[in-house]
Image: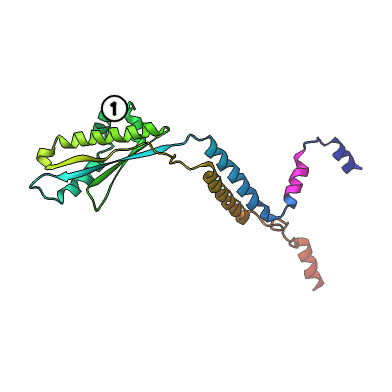
Amino acid sequence: MTDTLSRRHRPAGHPAPMLARVKRLPAWWLLPAGAVLGALTGGVYGAVKTPQYTATSYVIAVPEKGSDPTAALGFATAYGRVATQVAVLGDAQVESGVSPQTLRESVQAATSPDAPMISIAATAAKPGKAADIANAVSRSLTNNANHTKDSTRVRLLQLSRAVKPQAPASAAPPMTALVGGCAGGLLGGLTLLVRPRRGEDAAPASVPGPAQSADIDRDR
């Protein structure tokens, strides 16, 4: 009678029946649930996030006549390290129309251990802007380096201009959905491993109290 009255007065959206149903589900349901939730989250993120485009320009170090050819490789490495410094980016901001802070965040320079070449990669939300930034930074680096070519006996030349990328460099929604599904399935598996098993939270066996121990001694 009391249980019937409690069920009648229980609100329609009471969480107790839902929690009871969840507890009755098999343990492995966490794996597909996590994978589906992760895939949905990753797909929505990939669809909402603004695509990013990357354009790359290449600069090569050329030794002057009579200088050591191996010096060009060392200077290329040095110039690659200063390609994203304020002195170079400050001159590039005028041509690209982008602030030095934005240039520092969107430009990356890399060098090769085998060739005296520097790659200037720029990332932006528009393909044309990415190409403009990469070309502006490479020209600024070339101009700054050639100011000291009489002492270094090495000059920089722009080997290849950056062109507008045809496809975004950021991951497409199917790829982000796949990554999200894998991450969700992994988290579901970890949760399955650390969750308490049924029966582990049962009450421990009772220990006889002092009175019972005394009765046993009298029987002896």
Would you call the spot at circle 1 few (<14 residues within 10 Å), some (14-19), or many (20 or more)? some
x then y, percent, for residue 6: 85, 39
Magenta stretch, overall SS: helix
Amino acid under disc 1: Glu
Q: Which quadrant of the figure has residue 41?
A: top right
| Residue at position x 53%, y 35% in the image | 48
Q: Which residues are magenta?
A: 14-22
What residue does disc 1 label?
95
Q: Nearer the viewer, residue 125 or 100?
A: 125
Asked whether 133 falls inside the magenta stretch, the response is no
| Residue at position x 45%, y 41% in the image | 170
Q: Is residue 213 above or below residue 41?
A: below
Looking at the rendered image, the quarter that the C terminus falls into is bottom right
x then y, percent, for residue 219: 82, 71
x then y, percent, for residue 115: 23, 51
x then y, percent, for residue 171: 48, 43
Q: Nearer the viewer, residue 185 or 211?
A: 185
